[in-house]
Amino acid sequence: MPCLFSANESKFYIADMDNMKNMTNIKTRFAPSPTGSLHVGGARTALFNYCLARKLGGKFLLRIEDTDQARHDEGMVDLIVKDLRWLGIEWDEGFGKDHDPAGIGPFRQSERLGIYKTHIKKLLDEGKAYYAFDTAEELDVLREAAKAEKQDFRYERPATFPTEDQADAARAAGKPVVVRFACPVEDVTVHDEVFGDVLVTADQMDDFIIVKADGWPTYHLANVIDDALMGINLICRGQEFLKQSSRHIVLREAFGFPAPKYVHLPLIMDMQGKKLSKRDGDVEVDLFRVAGYLPEAMVNFIALLGWSPGGDREKFTLPELVELFDVSGIGKSNPKFDRDKLLSFNTDAVATAGEARLLECFKEFLEEIPTHIPSDNDQILRHLLRANAGFRTFPDVLKKSDVLFAPNDSYPFDEKAVQKVLAKNDGEGYVVLRDILGQLAEVEWNADPLEEWLRSYCEQKELGMGKVAQPIRVAVTGTTISPPIFDALVILGKENTLARISRCLAEKQTSE
Ligand code: GLU
């Protein structure tokens, strides 16, 4: 176990360098703020916390950090949960679980206000925190003054702290009443398992706000209290929180909470080396889901954003990842979010996924997007997946096959394809279509007999297969792009095929 941190022992955080494997009862957590949907960076944090807990025989907890009421979006809570589950990152305890044997919940911060209140009172009573009533304008004046003197702004602690009555009076007078932490004026070292010792000097520490004017705790306060009360002893999160950990350390000290280990993860960059953002394309997990990626490909790809098992190995399943995972594999350098690599991972994952798994994912995908393809006909869906073998993402399947399920009288015709395949050479394509209509009605509707019929028809008429197959394709799909023709026809069925050819002849040939 890491050494316990207490005000009496030392004012600095003392890192414990023991191997984590020697830690017992490891508990990690993912603590998203539902101000947006799950970003790939957040998914990586969740994944690494999951892996650490699984690998070290510990527990992984989910907590919802919803203290930012202005930016709160309730729909995001459900979406984050859905995205985590889609990725296969399941938690042992916390939000959404119906068991809480240790009685450490609730697991969303908006339901824990009473707990924070007790802790704030303790700090106020002990003189470790104080009320402040400065307006935004007053703070701006102070900031400007510091700037004029080329100094960093630091809030000046009053010689005596306002009383409760004074705070009430300020509130009554319409002033914004906050609580500030009386931060010890000393250097703080964050020991991080990835970035090593990170010194935050005393002049960088200040009396930061722990309760906002709206009465809600700040992220720092709620986060520290919850991690301690929920028994989190391994905190793994993005590098953007590394410096902030100094604030958490001093707060922990003030409460006498034990110290956790810290694992900060390097920032994810775009291919230009800038912080990954929306500018660069999709960054949210739900968007990759509706873009037809497989969760196993996403997980595999995300795992390599800042971590490597060593050697050349790049492909693994989630259980294999847990087996391979080690903090020593997390690097300090910023990983790049390479979308081409993700696409190639997905193409490979599609190729290696078993039929049942692919079908399961395809059905899930179809339920999320507008399509004519029925998500409840397994036989047809299997056929469709086989006919589209080699596809990269599910929309590739849709692009070629959605039209097969559209109403017979409304799919559009690509005029270029009509010209090239049907109308050219005095409408030779139309001639073929007219000619085969009657014959097709007699063919047994399966790939083999259809192929046999086409061959003998082509032989008899001394035509290349394409001269017959392409007009059929354009007639029944409106384009020259479709799954292999016999698959397309079988999926369509005889009746639809004949109806489509007739429609094509009626609509297109007469419009020539
Ligand atoms: N609620 C914070 C966020 O979503 C979590 C920070 C942490 O892991 O401590 O960014």
Image (spheres, helix red, strand yellow):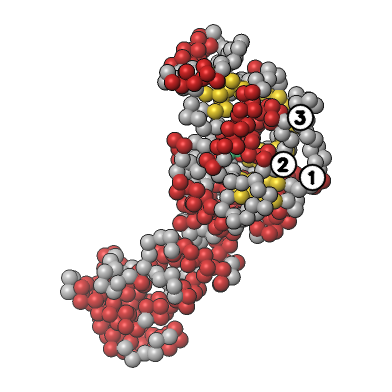
Q: Amino acid at mark 3?
A: Ser
Which comes before the other along the chain, label 3 or label 1? 3
Q: Residue at x 36, y 72 (%)?
A: 404
Q: In the rendered view, tell whether residue 211 sits above or below residue 367.
A: above
Q: In the rendered view, tell whether residue 253 sits above or below residue 59.
A: above
- Whole-percent x, y for residue 309 in the image: 72, 51
Q: Residues within 10 Å of mark 3 (few under 14, many from 20)?
A: some
Q: Amino acid at mark 2?
A: Asn
Q: Are marks 1 and 2 in contact (CB under 8 Å)?
A: yes
Q: Is mark 1 within 8 Å of ligand 1?
A: no
Q: Amino acid at mark 1?
A: Met
Q: Residue at x 52, y 70 (%)?
A: 359
Q: Residues within 10 Å of mark 2 (few under 14, many from 20)?
A: many
In the rendered image, the quadrant that contains the C terminus is bottom left
- Whole-percent x, y for residue 417 in the image: 30, 67
Disc number lying in front (2 or 3): 3
Q: Residue at x 47, y 78 (%)?
A: 379
For label 2, the residue is 233
Q: CA distance from mark 1 to mark 2?
A: 9 Å
In the rendered image, is residue 250 in sight? yes
Q: Which of the 4 image quadrants contains residue 425?
A: bottom left
For label 1, the residue is 23
For label 3, the residue is 6
